[in-house]
Amino acid sequence: MREHDLYERYESAFEGADDTMRRKGKRTTTRRDDAEPTRRGRMTEEEKLRVARVREDQLSTADTPEDGDRWSTWGDADQGPKPHPSWLITELAAVDRELGIVKTGKEADVFLLERAIGDRSSLLAAKRYRSNDHRMFHRDAGYLEGRRMKKSRETRAIANRTAFGRNLIAEQWAVAEFAALTRLWQIGAPVPYPVQRSGTELLLEFIGDADGNAAPRLAQTRPDEDELLDLWRQLVATLSTLAEAGITHGDLSAYNLMVHDGRLVVIDLPQVVDLVANPRGVEFLDRDVRNVCGWFAARGLPPEIGDPSALVATLLDVAGMT
């Protein structure tokens, strides 16, 4: 059960309480000084946080495996696209064990997770979106614009940035990234396989070696001339795959690309932009292209090869927008 579902059930138990008291002719505006305070029917933010903490404490004291931090959450999560990769462990008796933190970020932290059963194991990247008071999601207003929540209470909570609302925003970002990765994986784009989503946590294919060392970001590499040209060709092919699907990354840079065994991998995708539906779609595409072209130019790629204007024109043609 999601946290805000718990709140909703709590609140529904008190709905209509004031009307019932009025129908019985009882006054609710006064009480003796020594009387116990009565509830107003709506949980305060403090009460919501208290309920969440109690629930987390109960879960933390539940049955846990001796050789791990938790049992596999595969059965309770949104699962990745089929066919599943051969390395994926789907048995519910598998055990998850945290091995450390891989990366911290403005909106989310990434942890290294091992999922194992018997003599089989695989490394996963656990991306957990934050909803802390002092954190604001990058361009969340633009991302949430036009999205309608099922309940006006949730809409107000998001608009007012209450603790409940921030948690909803975090979950929406996780949902958006899982959906984007699933779509891109299915069309053959080089992205990490999206294993599962549960609440604000995404489990993704770990891009790195068997010892748990993450692959470097493109910005951290120093390729020679031949390697640079190969990476550029991979980038153009990747952007063409996205354009053919009518989308662009939306926040692409040399820090959102990884290089693993010479292969370029695109990451950090919650803000994928629809080139047609979004009125600023072409603007986002142009910015994505110029960001990465700038990096390649600084590393020595000839300007006649890495011309951003020419690449944008090519991608728009691939997208059928010329």
Image (cartoon, rainbow, N blue to C red):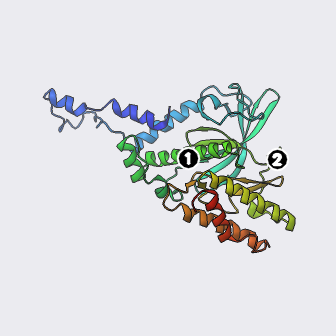
Residues 62 and 103: in front is 103
Badge number at residue 209: 2
Q: CA distance from mark 2 to mark 1?
A: 27 Å
Q: Quadrant of residue 119?
A: top right
Residue 62 figure quarter: top right
User: What label sits on residue 176 in the rendered view?
Assistant: 1
- The residue most toward the left is 25
Residue type at mark 2 is Asp
Identify the residue shown where x is 69% and y is 66%.
292
Place of residue 258 in the rendered image (x, y in percent of width and height, measured from the top left): 74, 55
Query: Does any portion of residue 252 appear in the rendered image?
Result: no
* Side of 139 relative to 222 (left or right): left
**Quadrant of the image containing the C terminus:** bottom right
Question: What residue is drawn where x is 13% and y is 28%?
Answer: 25
Residue 3: x and y, percent? Answer: 48, 37
Q: Work out whether 6 lies above or below 169.
A: above
